[in-house]
Amino acid sequence: MNLKEPRSIRISGMGGQGNILMGLILAESLVSEGYWVVQSQHYGAQVRGGLSFCDVLYSEEVIDYPKAEAFDVLYIMNDIAFPHLTMIKNNGIVFYDSSYIKALPQTVSRITKKIVAIPASKLAYEELGNTNVANMIGLGAIAKNCEIVKLDTLIRVMKKRVNPRFFEIDEKALKIGYNYTNKKYEIKTNEKNGRGL
């Protein structure tokens, strides 16, 4: 039986940057748009300040194995997550917050040319006066650039996940990210036999 390998996304950064919330909203948005989804998260020893990341796998078909060894999309929020850059697939898509990360290691450009710099934290501060919503800007940008889920879906799911007093600012942040760049990178899908192990 041939199964499509699920598309895979890792959102990685420092604990407290909101990458887990990004992954939860993305995963739930994908479910609501009809995909099969697996979402997992990892916190370092220090919840704030240590490395934390969130993985989202999604497919039009049942996902037979809940982990990815390499990723189609990687979003790096802080240079603490640089070790994860080795896990991007050939010709995968790398997003990074250029407010904090001035440059990625040169090795990345040998793996992929699909690299998108988003000054998410700078935009959050300049446009909304709050760097805490940089994660929503990043989420909007990933969703738009890779054509993963619709903006309306993200906004609806976000309102189920956050405190109502943050609805307005988080919605604005999602829209800023969604409209930030017109680059489009399609996530390729591959078929695999069985579990492909």
Image: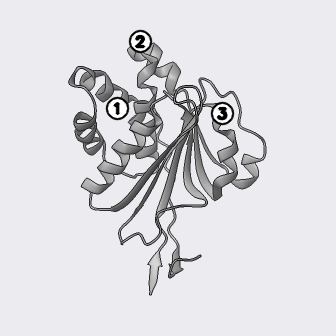
Between circles 2 and 3, the one closer to the viewer is: 3
Badge 2 is on which residue? 129
Q: On the rendered image, what quadrant is the C terminus found in? A: bottom right
Q: Secondary structure at mark 3?
A: helix
Above or below, 150 relative to 36: above
Between circles 1 and 2, the one closer to the viewer is: 2
Q: Position of residue 5 (x, y in %)?
A: 49, 70
- Residue 104 in view in this figure: yes
Q: CA distance from mark 2 to mark 3?
A: 25 Å
Q: Nearer the viewer, residue 124 or 5?
A: 5
Q: Position of residue 12 (x, y in %)?
A: 55, 40
Image point (46%, 15%), residue name: 125
Q: On the rendered image, what quadrant is the N terminus found in? A: bottom left
Crowdedness of circle 1 by 10 Å Cα count: few (<14), some, many (20+)?
many
Instruction: Farthest residue to the front: give it.
Output: 45
Above or below, 5 relative to 99: below
Q: Position of residue 180 (x, y in %)?
A: 45, 32
Taking 185 as reference, is 60 left or right? left
Between circles 3 and 1, the one closer to the viewer is: 3
Crowdedness of circle 3 by 10 Å Cα count: few (<14), some, many (20+)?
some
Badge 1 is on which residue? 175
Q: Position of residue 117 (x, y in %)?
A: 59, 35
The answer to the question of whether label 1 and label 2 lie on touching residues, with beta carbons closer than 8 A, is no
Above or below, 124 relative to 72: above
Crowdedness of circle 2 by 10 Å Cα count: few (<14), some, many (20+)?
few
Q: CA distance from mark 3 to mark 1?
A: 27 Å
Identify the mark nearer the N-term, 2 or 3.
3
Identify the mark nearer the N-term, 1 or 2.
2
Q: Secondary structure at mark 2?
A: loop
Badge 3 is on which residue? 80
Residue type at mark 2? Gly
